[in-house]
Image (cartoon, rainbow, N blue to C red):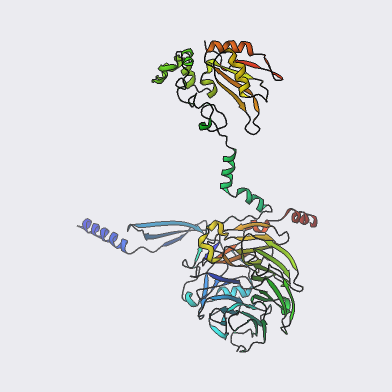
Amino acid sequence: MSKVAGRTDWAEEEDEDSLALPPPQITKNKDGTETIVSYRIDENGKKVKTTRRIRKTVMKQVVNPRVAERKHWSKFGEEKGKPVGPQSDTTSIAENIVFRPSSNWKTNQSEEKNPIDKQKATLKDAKIKCRICSGEHWTSKCPFKDTMAPEGENAGAGAGTGAEEESAAPGLGPSNSSYVPPHLRGKSGVTGERMGGGKFGQERDDLATLRVTNVSEFAEEQDLRDMFTRFGHVTRVFLAKDRETGRAKGFAFVSYADRTDAARACEKMDGYGFHHLILRVEFAKKPTT
Amino acid sequence: MRPILLSGHTRALTQVKYSKDGDIIFSVSKDQIICAWYAANGERLGTYHGHQGALWTVDVDPTTTLLASGAADNTIRLWDVKTGKLLKTWDFGTAIKRVEFSPDGTQLLGVTERRQGHLSTIVVYDIVLDVEAEQADEHSLRIVCEDSKATVAGFSYGSKYIISGHEDGSVTQWDAKTGELLDSAQIQEDDMQITDLQWSSDRTYFITASKDKTAKLVAANDLRVLKTYVADTPLNSAAITPVKDYVILGGGQAAMDVTTTSARQGKFEARFYHKIFEEEIGRVRGHFGPLNYVAVDPQGKSYASGGEDGYVRLHHFDRGYFDFLYEVEREAEQANL
């Protein structure tokens, strides 16, 4: 019986507890700190016990007696009857502000300023790159857009240069359009290399392309075309030019429809004197076989 | 630096003032009440009720016993600082734009607005520094500003001159005893209103803020422009800091244009300039409306700004503020040691 009664007591006590919160307890610790245990009911109706351990330090400040006297004035007006200390409805602490005076504040500021201007500046410097020939112009303005496919597309499907396709390695061509499993790719020669991520200019008709270096800066594409068509059908001449000055940068690529023509041209034109310089001609990509 | 946000007002602040000891701050706003705050912790001491119109200005005497306020209800009122009791009311024909006690607290000046049939005037009252005493009904001096209306005014050192700032950007020096016009100088741009005039701690020079986006340091005895501080926004207020050689400028886009500009563009920041080198050394953000007034603790420990946004932000300076020195200052200090 007593047990049961005890239980009811316990249950009742718990019930009362949730209605009336126990008063906060303050215990003084040996090391000079205080432990405050307080209770409150949170928004879910649950009782929350908060234990805080604080240390009180007395800060002594010497002030003018006038000021000290004014500190104890009683409040008046709208504040009349309110307890001592800042009231939360009128006084609050704002977020921390870092204020570091500096002598070159202005210059620092102008650097940080205007993210938009900064973005514009980077855009201004950004290079335009053609997806077909990697030149510094829009793809749609590319002089080769009719004869060549953009980077990433099937090189063979580029243009009406069937000869190129035939002369190219067996890995290219029609078979290229179908899916090749990764483990087979390595064996299919050029395709594999292609996947390996060569630079664009070399991965197209690389087998019949010559790299011409030591080109005079006054050279024009037409000059090169004239010189190289002597050895066979030239599909493309690309002369790298400086964007600002419009002058040649000193190298060019010449692509032939036929690799044998390219080989002959390479042999004949290497060491050929053009303008005041001697051309150096080599295959853009060394044959894999 | 953690600012204390004082949110006792419901409308735009118009002026904020420290007591001479820097322990109490008085703020007035367009909501017709005056608030008194403890500067140390931002606790509100009380409010002063009685004005029937937007308050424009407030000042406290050097002993912190009497408080004067001027409002759009055409009155200057005198209050007991301690209890909030109204002691005296002076009635005028127009609104009061500025009140200020003389350095010894025995005189009070008021600047009245110009309106149809009324010229702008500066009136001076003799004050008995006692809460119980009966204050004079009649002014002891009345200066009429015929050319351009006065917007701000104050007493120079020893109550020798009254200096007034005008709507047309000029400052005028009057004899504080006779009211005689002694000197006048066009220091700001033409027709750019002087919005504020605050004194250095010894009252030998003062700083003006103007709508022409500059603040100027001017000598009181010959109205010579000593320094110019150039900002990028119209200024509403300027203050000289004691202890450190800085000035604080406050301003921002005019209240009527605020809704059309972003907070960033509004430039609602307190700008710190070095007083001697005239160079901007930093800014303090926080307000989301133009700063209508900046006040500096006469002890140099804090500053308060009142904004169009209805808040007073009270900033206690931290180490970085006091430690900052220019290279040349540091060298000079080394040489002295």
Residue at the limit of the structure toward the right, as seen here? B335
Res A249 visible: yes
- Residue at 59%, 55% in the rendered image: A98
Q: Which of A94 and B334 is in front in this view?
A: A94
Q: Quadrant of residue A213?
A: top right
Can you give x and y, in whole percent of width and height, for residue A80 in the image?
47, 76
Against B36, is A35 above or below? above
Against A211, is B197 above or below? below
Against A173, is A100 above or below? below
Residue at the limit of the structure toward the left, as seen here? A1
Q: In this view, does A158 lie to the left or right of B101?
A: left
* The N terminus of chain A lies in quadrant: bottom left
Q: Quadrant of residue A100?
A: bottom right
Can you give x and y, in whole percent of width and height, for residue A96 in the image?
55, 56
- Residue at 43%, 56% in the rendered image: A51
Q: Which of B29 and A71 is in front in this view?
A: B29
Q: In this view, does B110 lie to the left or right of A4?
A: right
Q: Nearer the viewer, residue A165 or B315?
A: A165
